[in-house]
Amino acid sequence: MERKKVTITDIQNKKRDGKKITALTAYDYPMARVLDEAGLDIVLVGDSLGMVVLGYDSTVPVTMDEMIHHAKAVRRGTKYAFMIGDMPFLSYQVSKEDAIRNAGRFMKEAGCDAVKLEGGYDAVEATEAIVNAGIAVLGHIGLTPQSASKLGGFKVQANSAERARRLIDEALMLEKAGCFAVVLECVPEAVAKIVTEKLSIPTISCGAGRWCDGQILVLNDVIGLYDKFTPKFVKQYAKLSHAALEGVKKYKDEVEKGIFPSDEHVFTIKEEELRKLKKRR
Ligand code: KIV
């Protein structure tokens, strides 16, 4: 069957049909190609970029320019998946105009299909403004890493009746504001189940358990390329850092011992040409 580009309708139909939505983050061209070839529905250029690629301690320092630079590379490697740009800290909180302008940059400069905003009540105004400007928005509530400091650190959210009620309200508000789906991060799965049942748009779990309509994780956690901190909800499917270290160590050893390069890695010149060359010198 001919493969087609994933659309919002395809993503929303998956909820209706009881099929799981698959999503991961990507930050560059080669990994975007891997995700696209694997057939994922969604590729998110997450602002987790700041921590797992740029080496910052949090996502707070990430700038719009950094996000656009990486989103452009991901675009070049993504043919079929639905590609979302993650709005970094302070790119949508200051004013509605800023929010629209920066969301627009993801669409115009990087060719994204949608943007993602962190926040519940606080993000409703910006979400509405961006949606009204004709740009699709993925919501993100529960643990919102850009405001981890305000939330008291990277910890489970909505784990009391009162906080869970607030999360449900926020999810409903984001649906009303026009989000096409919402990410629930670090939330007890029983609470995520209630949200999933209450919303007509899909929920995508990032540490919110099995009852959501889809799953998303940070790629570098999944393939073992980031070992500074691994949340409980992450499952590692490959150990690329380890494989890379082994490869680089072997390269160093072979260079030092004169094993690399060998015959198969060098270029030759005809004996006759070489003789002429040596004679003339
Ligand atoms: O920045 C990110 O990578 C994210 C998710 C994993 C949801 O926001």
Image (spheres, rainbow, N blue to C red):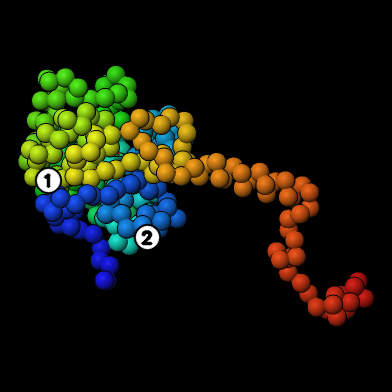
Q: Amino acid at mark 1?
A: Ile
Q: Secondary structure at mark 1?
A: loop
User: Could you tell me residue 56's position as x and y percent?
Assistant: 44, 32
Identified at 15% across, 41% down, the residue is 127
In the image, 192 versus 278, the foreground residue is 192
User: Could you tell me residue 244's position as x and y percent?
Assistant: 56, 45
Report the side of 67 relative to 9 (left or right).
right
Q: Which residue is mark 1?
A: 201
Q: Amino acid at mark 2?
A: Glu
Disc on the earlier residue, 2 or 1? 2
Identified at 61% across, 47% down, the residue is 247
Report the side of 86 relative to 237 (left or right).
left
Residue 268 visible within the image: yes
Identified at 73% across, 50% down, the residue is 254
In the image, 251 versus 178, the foreground residue is 251
Q: CA distance from mark 2 to mark 1?
A: 26 Å
Q: Secondary structure at mark 2?
A: helix
Q: Quadrant of ligand 1?
A: top left
